[in-house]
């Protein structure tokens, strides 16, 4: 019989459990509660449940039981802070409920993430903003790019409200859910920021009374300054969170605006968005500067070239490897970035409650950052059986931005739509190509693990690759290339049309172009030309490394080794990166550990129990198999490991899906590998 019983208030929240059992007693429910609470404690997780009030407002409550997927919550979830993990990656898990509308589920998922991870969002925003404004000196350009993003959002929302004739309505419906999740993120973060401000005000009043001998005193506003150490969660505007989610797109938007493009497409100019000082650089772009300002100081010149060339020519590495006997398929990804971007969260979303039939992959696991609703590395594992990775290509000539318009769907939004809607690599590239923004221009690799049969010929459609530019979109099924052993990716465009259009020949002097190598050499700066010379698909340094070493990659450990490979100048021997080093201590690193000496860690969407798992564990307690489980965390952890009744991980082929999240002493992170031989396995570290 179905019986609804009300438990007492736990952690200040009275909740209701719906059990489908013959007879449910308070003792049974107490056993479930105690078991789940101990399982959750062993994970050092903070829990949250988002509910919608009768007036339409939203609130986060702590159900206290650690269960995911409660029907009473529009979204429920857990967050383990990075300070509690071996890899220094936080862990976020969110599940939505079919008891609510699709829009409410999406909003609640964002609200819960914004609320639970608010402190880390504030840390990440501060570090990211300082990187753009101080280190890249892009303050004015950043504000212009945010104006552009607001115009793009207005256009996209108009399409959601009234889809264009002849277009698939589900596409715009799901974009509406992505937008709703973002609105929820803003709402949840700001709700938490208000609570934190109220707490600071209360503390200030208490301190004032203490100093005044109990007679009161000035209360203070509780606001605090931006980035103050005593402010855990400061106020951020909606625009700030828009910047965080679109930061991959922002680089190209800034470049386009500085080259004089991307504004009013009616007259082909950006006059409405660009001040005169910026328009003077039209057609050039930030990454194609004039070289009259070659700096004789080697340190300053190295910094210039590092920002303009070296850093922009290498941001990620990826390797897809099939072993010689076709028995194993291994995927590896490593992200390179500034150390200011080392605040990380590994996320698991479960939108199984959505009713929209266009959703082919409701569950996803991905490496990410606080406040960002996509990976940004990128690396995704999807319940459709798809794995998605990318490495960034770069644009070296400003004119390629001429087709760019705010009438588009941003890269991060199209990724989410393709991940939701596609069940094959071909479908993924089709969805992703719609309304191409020409921003965050990457090479995406889509692996369909359903098409891999160990020890059999690779099936067509196993590996799709796509590259984009403004006005250019190239795709191909490259499974035949993979059948030769491996597919590498290293920030150099694969498709010749993309390579030429993006300006790589202008960099290296190919195809009759006078490249920067010759220009730098003529100006007496030959030693700075080396980092440019190898921007060719076949001879790029990482192309050579992968070609030389991929043959020994036949296991998870071997994949981990090659994705961490760094023989500069002789690896090993380098100490772990530390912020207290005098060379780096003044750079922004709010909320980060001092030393990055972390290890690989297994990541799974099922580290915390569902209600059904807790009920099974409680039955084991009642039967005597789990005596004492409700009394301490050790036995609870044992139950978590041993209880066989577990919900499936996001990829249906995999009883043991995980990733290795890596932190090294150089700016490479988010390294991820997975493998499949009859099952999908993985690691990250």
Image: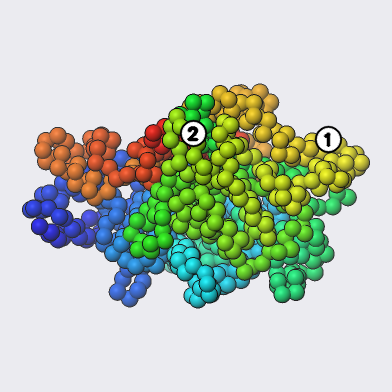
Tell me the crowding category of disc 1: few under 14, some 14 to 19, or many 20 or more residues within 10 angstroms, Cα based.
few
Of the residues tagged 1 and 2, which is closer to the observer? 2
- Pick the residue in front: 281 or 317: 317
Q: Position of residue 148 (x, y in %)?
A: 64, 67
Is residue 116 visible in the rendered image? The answer is no
The outermost residue toward the left is 23
Residue drawn 47% across the image and 62% down it: 178
Residue drawn 7% across the image and 53% down it: 23
Q: Are marks 1 and 2 in contact (CB under 8 Å)?
A: no
Q: Earlier in the sequence, mark 1 or mark 2?
A: 2
Seen in the picture, residue 653 relative to 258 is either above or below; the reply is above
Residue drawn 75% across the image and 70% down it: 268
Q: Position of residue 167 (x, y in %)?
A: 52, 69
Q: Position of residue 93 (x, y in %)?
A: 38, 50
Q: Which mark is residue 527?
A: 1
Q: Secondary structure at mark 1?
A: helix
Is residue 315 visible in the rendered image? The answer is yes
Tell me the crowding category of disc 2: few under 14, some 14 to 19, or many 20 or more residues within 10 angstroms, Cα based.
few
Residue drawn 57% across the image and 31% down it: 485
For the residues labelled 1 and 2, the Cα–Cα distance comes to: 47 Å
Of the 4 image quadrants, the one containing the N terminus is bottom left
- Pick the residue in front: 447 or 21: 447
State the residue position of label 2.
457
Q: Is residue 539 left or right of residue 514?
A: left
């Amino acid at each position: 019989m179905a019986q609804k019983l009300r438990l007492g208030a736990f952690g200040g929240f009275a909740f209701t459990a719906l059990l489908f059992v013959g007879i449910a007693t308070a003792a049974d429910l107490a056993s479930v509660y105690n078991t789940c609470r101990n399982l959750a404690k062993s994970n050092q997780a903070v829990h949250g449940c988002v509910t919608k009030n009768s007036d339409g407002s939203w609130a986060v409550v702590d159900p206290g039981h650690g269960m995911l997927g409660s029907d009473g919550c529009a979204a429920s979830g857990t967050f383990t802070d990075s300070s509690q993990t071996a890899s220094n990656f936080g862990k976020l898990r969110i599940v939505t409920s079919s008891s609510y509308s699709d829009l409410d589920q999406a909003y609640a998922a964002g609200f819960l993430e914004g609320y639970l991870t608010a402190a880390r969002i504030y840390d990440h925003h501060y570090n990211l903003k300082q990187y753009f404004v101080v280190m890249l000196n892009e303050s004015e350009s950043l504000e212009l790019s945010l104006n552009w993003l607001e115009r793009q959002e207005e256009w996209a929302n108009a399409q959601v409200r009234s889809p264009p004739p002849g277009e698939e309505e589900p596409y715009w419906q799901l974009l509406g859910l992505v937008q709703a999740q973002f609105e929820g993120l803003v709402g949840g973060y700001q709700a938490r920021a208000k609570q934190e401000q109220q707490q600071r005000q209360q503390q200030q009043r208490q301190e004032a009374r203490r100093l005044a001998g109990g007679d009161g005193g000035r209360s203070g506003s509780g606001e605090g300054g931006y980035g103050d150490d005593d402010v855990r969660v400061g106020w951020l505007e909606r625009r700030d969170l828009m910047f965080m989610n679109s930061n991959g797109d922002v680089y190209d938007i800034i470049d386009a605006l500085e080259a004089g493009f991307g504004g009013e497409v009616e007259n082909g100019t950006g006059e409405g968005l660009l001040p005169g000082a910026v328009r003077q650089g039209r057609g050039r772009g930030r990454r194609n500067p004039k070289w009259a300002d070659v700096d004789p100081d080697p340190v300053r010149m190295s910094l210039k070239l590092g920002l303009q060339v070296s850093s922009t020519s290498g941001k990620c590495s990826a390797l897809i490897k099939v072993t010689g006997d076709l028995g194993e398929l291994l995927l590896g990804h490593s992200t390179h970035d500034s150390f200011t971007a080392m605040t990380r969260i590994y996320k698991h979303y479960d939108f199984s409650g959505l009713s929209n039939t266009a959703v082919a992959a409701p569950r996803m696991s991905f490496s990410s950052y606080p406040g960002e609703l996509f990976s940004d590395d990128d690396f995704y594992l999807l319940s459709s059986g798809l794995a998605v990775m990318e490495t960034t290509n770069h644009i070296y000539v400003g004119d390629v931005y001429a087709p760019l318009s705010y009438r588009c769907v941003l890269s991060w939004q199209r990724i989410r739509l393709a991940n939701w809607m596609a069940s094959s690599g071909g479908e993924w590239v089709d969805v992703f190509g719609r309304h191409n923004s020409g921003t965050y221009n990457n090479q995406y690799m889509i692996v369909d693990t359903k098409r891999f049969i160990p020890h059999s010929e690779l099936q067509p459609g196993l590996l799709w690759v796509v590259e984009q530019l403004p006005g250019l979109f190239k795709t191909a099924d490259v499974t035949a290339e993979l059948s030769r052993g491996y597919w590498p990716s290293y920030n150099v465009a694969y498709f010749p049309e993309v390579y030429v259009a993006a300006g790589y020949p202008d960099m290296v002097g190919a195809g009759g172009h006078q490249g920067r190598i010759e220009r730098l050499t003529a100006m007496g700066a030959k030693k700075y030309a080396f980092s440019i010379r190898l921007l060719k698909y076949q001879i790029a340094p990482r192309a050579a490394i992968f070609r030389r070493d991929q043959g020994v990659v036949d296991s998870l450990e071997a994949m981990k080794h090659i994705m961490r490979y760094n023989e500069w100048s002789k690896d090993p021997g380098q100490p772990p990166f530390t912020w207290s080093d005098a060379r780096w201590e003044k750079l922004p690193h709010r909320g980060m550990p001092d030393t990055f000496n972390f290890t690989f860690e297994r990541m799974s969407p099922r580290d915390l129990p569902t209600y059904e798992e807790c009920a099974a564990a409680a039955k084991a307690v009642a039967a005597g198999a789990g005596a004492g489980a409700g009394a301490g965390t050790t036995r609870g952890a044992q139950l978590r490991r041993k209880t066989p009744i577990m919900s499936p991980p996001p990829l249906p082929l995999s009883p043991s899906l995980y990733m290795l999240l890596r932190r090294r002493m150089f700016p490479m992170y988010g390294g991820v590998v997975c493998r499949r031989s009859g099952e999908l396995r993985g690691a990250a570290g």
